[in-house]
Image (tube, coloured by chain):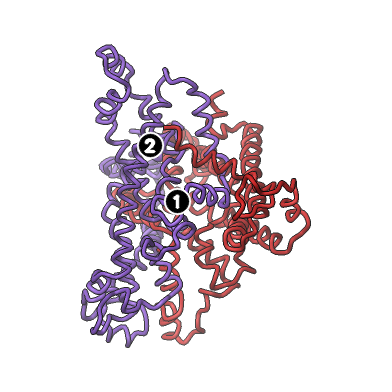
Amino acid sequence: MMVFIGFFYLPLLGNVIAFKDYQPFIGILESEWVGLDNFRVLWSGDPEFLNALKNTLIITALQLMFTFPVPIALALLMNSLLSQAFKRWVQSILYLPYFLSWVVVVAIFQHILGYNGPLESFMAAIGGPEPQIIGNPDFFKPLLILQDIWKNAGWGTILFLAALGGIDEGLYQAAAVDGASRWRQLWHVTLPGIRSVVILILILRIGDILTVGFEQIILQQQAVGRDVSEVLDTYVYNNGILGGDWGTSAAVGLVKGVIGVGLVLLANKLAHMFGEAGIYRKAQR
Amino acid sequence: MSVMERGHAHTGPEAATTRSPKRGRRSGGLYVGYRSHWAAEGAKMLALGLCCLVVLGPFAMVVATSLADPEQIARDGGMVLWPEVPTLEAYRAIFTGGQISGAIGVSAFVTIVGTAVALSVTSLLAYALSRRTMPFRGVLLGAVLLTMLFGVGIIPLYLTVKTFHLLDSLWSLIIPVSVSAFNVIVMRQFFQNLPDEISEAATIDGASELKIFTTIIVPLSKPIFAAIGLFYAVNFWNTFFSALLYINDQSKWPIQLILRQYLVNNAQVGLDEVAMAGEMPPAQPSLQMAILVVSLIPIVCVYPFLQKHFTKGMLTGAIKG
């Protein structure tokens, strides 16, 4: 039974190649130890690595700014609906894209927004300029964000809706008695009510700060070039598995994993300092 | 007015995500003196309706194009909004053998076998972790949780698969992803909520652990098996990146790699792929969209169950941890 954890813990050992000059033909054990040589690329300022890091951070920042608030806004909107039947229809429809693979999502976007797609026909019909969105490096990052929202925003509302449902009705009644308008009720009752869930999701998101839409990007990288699209994960894939630079790529991957754990723990600690529950395991103490 | 609104909100059946019985009444219900109230409701419905249109519109176009005849496609130059003369030619073409039919078979195999393997492994592990008599339970639980926090890099994973000689084998798509820590935790939580007395009684009657698990626990846990099973099945059907990494042999490509080839990279769907020698093949956009629709069918078929079980599973998992 436990053997199957092997696919997590064995690869963990495989991380030793980050400290070796790995030669595929010799094997992991026989390859030479090189200490921290592979990590040198991280601080020696290798331009490709720096470019990947830069793109990763930009995309993460964009996601936090644009993708993160959308499910919250959607959930608030859905929660304030009076018609429950309509709400269930909306939910059923908006959850759907979450279950599609990235290949499908990217394909749909390319064919709708791209060459010969309906958007182009529309622009031609109204005499507008030809839309060059797909394959245009300038539009690549906004496009990523748009796809991310289209695919995941609906599904993301679930937890917030659950949190909204858990708010005590009495609080609204009390606020209404005190003469609070609907906007003030939103501000003083609803938002504090979902604060802990928002913070929880934010913490988990922070752990993934160096992980941005890998499949999504790999699929579209060819069209726009690595300058704008290379992120840490694709760097590891392109240089390691395609390029054969195993050691350095493994080192980048390892550092990324360690930083991820560190960030989650740090964010959790901060949340505790501000009196929030944070991740559940700590909260139980 | 307020009473009427409250009544109206109450008559609506509980939404899928609703947990608290108090939930029926919306915060909007109490307000008196908001004459713009129905206007506000209408505006919200319009906004959400637009969101739904943005989600569903592309699907409608995809289906329409897959059904359109070559003439109309030639005239419109690409996607169409409504097929004038609907035809199933494109579907017939991709199902007459060739690489695309093969890929559907590969994906079906990986999904069915993968889900069976993943469910057995996950449930056994979760059951073991739920038993108080299990030795080293805490350590093992910690080991499972750690996998949620720390992501192993792509390269060590690739090398592991290579070491086990799984490259170019369909098992490489199944075994490495057959246990997800999150699912183990959710299932364990479910098993723990079953009353202990049942298994104790069975132990006294002389049943072995495995016997208890298969004859008592599994039948009691059908809902969680359905939920987690669907979760795995969708993931297996959507397998893209592991296939890109591990499978070089084109005859073993799953449907997602075919989609990438013909829809994302816009490769021409040739006569080999559709195996229609001697006939005029349907227009490229129809073929492409037909492949896309076929890849969607399984998801759409299980979607009603997905939505119900997932929402529940997600909530139990997230709230109880």
Looking at the image, tell me whether mark 1 or mark 2 is earlier in sequence order. 2
Q: Amino acid at mark 1?
A: Leu
Task: Give the number of marks.
Answer: 2
Q: Is residue B161 visible?
A: yes
Q: At which x and y percent is residue B111? A: 33, 51
- Of badges 1 and 2, the one in the foreground is 1
Q: Is residue A190 left or right of residue B196?
A: right
Q: What residue did someone put label 2 on?
A: B121
> What crowding class fits label 2: few (fewer than 14 Cα within 10 Å), some (14-19), or many (20 or more)?
many
The residue at 40%/59% (across/down) is B43
Q: Is residue B257 above or below residue A206?
A: below
Hey, which quadrant is residue B193 in on the image? top left
Which of A14/A205 is in front? A14
Which of A91/B153 is in front? B153
Quick one: which chain is purple?
B
The residue at 59%/41% (across/down) is A13
The picture's colour for chain A is red
Q: Is residue B113 left or right of residue A157?
A: left
What subunit carries mark 2? B
What subunit carries mark 1? B
Q: What residue did someone put label 1 on?
A: B166
Q: Are marks 1 and 2 on the same chain?
A: yes
Q: At which x and y percent is residue A14? A: 59, 44
Q: Secondary structure at mark 1?
A: loop
Q: Is residue B141 above or below residue A128?
A: above
Q: Amino acid at mark 2?
A: Val
